[in-house]
Amino acid sequence: MKGPKALVPLLSKREADPVFIGALAGNQGEIILLVVIDTNAMPGQFGFAANDIAGGSQLMEKIRDALELVGKHCADVIEWGDTAMKIEHLALLKGVERIFVVEQDNQYYKKLLRELREKLGKIEFVEVRLPAEEKKR
């Protein structure tokens, strides 16, 4: 597969959005989807807590299916542990050149990205801004 290798940690639970899929499907080579089951994560706020394994797997499947529709194949990885540490280790292990994330406006996301940028200085971070979610009535 030609193009840069990309890691996609599923953090926002909105990564199946067509805007994100479109950005990711560009000129990427290998795409690695990562779900981290973080026992320290706050349910419903950021990432996936231990009680949300099925949700992470379903999101990963939706993204994989959407990428396959545009001719992209990806690898799925589910890890247990600290979100930042797992992203860092997998990025280094797989030699990724880009990390794609859905831009979020919360302190956990901002702290995570700051830490990862410091540790993974040579890797490009691609933050994709999605349209605001409509409030459920």
Image (cartoon, rainbow, N blue to C red):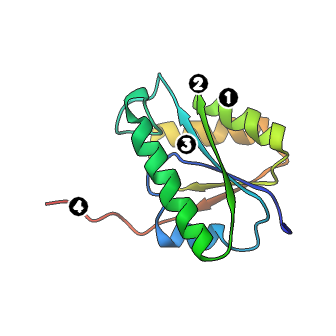
Image x and y of residue 48, in percent? 45, 36
Q: Are marks 4 and 2 in contact (CB under 8 Å)?
A: no
Q: Which residue is mark 4?
A: 135
What is the quadrant of the C terminus in the image? bottom left
**How crowded is the residue under tag 3: few (<14 C-alpha within 10 Å), some, or many (20+)?**
few
Q: Which residue is mark 3?
A: 110
Separation of marks 4 and 1 at Cα, in angstroms: 33 Å
Image x and y of residue 102, in percent? 53, 56
Separation of marks 3 and 2 at Cα, in angstroms: 19 Å
Comparing 75 with 22, the one in front is 75
Image x and y of residue 90, in percent? 74, 38
Circle 4 sits in a helix, a strand or a loop, which is it?
loop
**How crowded is the residue under tag 2: few (<14 C-alpha within 10 Å), some, or many (20+)?**
some
Q: Which residue is mark 1?
A: 85
Separation of marks 3 and 4 at Cα, in angstroms: 23 Å
Residue 14 occupies which quadrant of the picture?
bottom left
Amino acid at circle 3: Lys
**How crowded is the residue under tag 1: few (<14 C-alpha within 10 Å), some, or many (20+)?**
some
Circle 3 sits in a helix, a strand or a loop, which is it?
helix
Mark seen at residue 3: none
- The number of callouts visible is 4
Amino acid at circle 4: Lys
The residue under the point 76% across, 67% down is 28
Using the rendered image of the protein, determine whether residue 112 is visible from the camera's viewpoint. yes
